[in-house]
Image (cartoon, grey):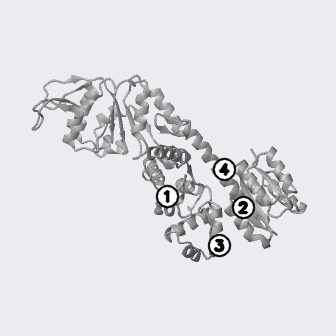
Amino acid sequence: MKERILIIDDEPIAVRNLAYALRKNGYEVTTRESGTGGLEALQTQTFELILTDLRMERVDGMAILKRALETDPDMAVVLITAHGTLDSAVEAMKAGAFHYVAKPFRLDEVRSIVANALQLVQLKRENRRLRAQVSNGLHTHAGLVTQNPAMLRLLDTAQQVAATDTTLLINGQSGTGKELLARYLHQHSRRSQGAFVGVNCGALQEDLLANELFGHEKGAYTGAGEARAGLIEAANGGTLFLDEIGEMSLAMQVKLLRVVQEREVQRLGAQTAVPVDVRLITATHRDLRAEVAAGRFRQDLYFRLDVVGLHLPSLVERRDDIPLLAFFFLRKHALRMGREVENIAPAAMSVLLGYHYPGNVRELENLIERGVALARGNELTVAELPAALAAQTIHALPEAPTELPSLVQREEEYIRYVLEHCDGNRTKAAQILGIDRVSLWRKLKKYGLVEGEE
């Protein structure tokens, strides 16, 4: 669908030139030659952007700006102004205008500002759509939040194999949601009414892990005053999830192999085994084939565990999920903390989208939780994100890029980078950037990095 632009100017030549240039760029353009006509168009049509002259008789650009934002807060308004009214244009930006162009304007400048404004409108509307979807519980699958096609295919596969009761191995980096996927499998299995028991094999020493998994008889060791069933028995009739199975020692692997083969468990100090009916799901961030080759993991156990393998992609492999996840976590932690933070500023979302997330989804949630705790209003902004985060999104140009970033994108990233390193000192940042404070403020306003007055 073409993006819709309304041009309002009482100079017919300016209207024709702008309309011609923007239509050539593929936009759907409506024109009016008076402020009154512009207001009438706003009553009957919808637009993504308005280009309006600031000084017009009866209804001026400020009146158009006010009505436009009342009609649609996400709409972008760009003021057209003469050199003598630049101060009024800055005031209009403080009132909510996206930017301004000065007469006589350059068409390439107008095209650039229009493209940036429409990108911001798209982000705002996408944010609103995502908030609504999160509120309605859409794209949430037993705790897994996604709209990514590869993830949806994975969940479809998981749902198919969940009912088979076969042993499953989940592979993925730390923080990708392996336990959530295991719970998804459990909830879609015939064992969903049974217990889901999870244990992290890398969090316990070998003796403690053995005691937790297998339990013990009274007197099995010093301090064992009474018999206790282990987690394997606790999962009887349900699902046992062993996270970070690659951290398990070879000795423990031998004991687990017996459970898998014989469907029975022997408590520490017991003479007989107890039969168990357990569905086993394991997970690891390691390459178990490489671990087998290195002699750190038993081959026979590996083949028993990897009957069906499921791979969870990293967060950077599913970047289209970042906005959805961000709003999901925003709502979750805002409710938990009793904070009225309900939006993420476009500039902050841009930083989140550009980060590389070594901690994956878990790290994104931590960032959002931190932002909610620090937010001063109802919106999470760049100021609430760690100072080093924006700097890490500044990266060198690749030697053979598949998609080159625009100069505008680079400018926004660099301005944010300089401000972070100047601790928000705009005077110092302006000196480094080689511009005055007023020019810096205009750029900050353009990219949604500042609120209020200069």
Q: Earlier in the sequence, mark 1 or mark 2?
A: 2
Identify which residue is drawn at 51% across, 57% down.
376
Q: Earlier in the sequence, mark 2 or mark 3?
A: 2
Residue contact at pointers 1 and 4, CB within 8 angstroms? no
Secondary structure of the residue carrying tag 4 is helix
Q: Which residue is mark 3?
A: 438
Q: Earlier in the sequence, mark 3 or mark 1?
A: 1
Q: Position of residue 302 (x, y in %)?
A: 32, 36
- For residue 113, which numbered disc appears in the image? 2
Q: Position of residue 131 (x, y in %)?
A: 57, 43
For the residues marked 1 and 2, what is the alpha-carbon distance in whole angstroms? 27 Å
Judged left or right of residue 82, residue 408 is: left
Residue type, label 3: Val
- For residue 219, which numbered disc appears in the image? none
Where 88 falls versus 344 (above or below)? below
Q: Quadrant of residue 407?
A: bottom right
- For residue 122, which numbered disc appears in the image? 4
Count neighbours of disc 2 (C-alpha within 10 A) and say few if under 14, some if 14 to 19, many if 20 or more: some
Q: Nearer the viewer, residue 211 or 349?
A: 349
Residue 31 seen by the camera: no
Q: Quadrant of residue 77?
A: bottom right
Q: Earlier in the sequence, mark 1 or mark 4?
A: 4
For the residues marked 3 and 1, what is the alpha-carbon distance in whole angstroms? 24 Å
Secondary structure of the residue carrying tag 3 is helix
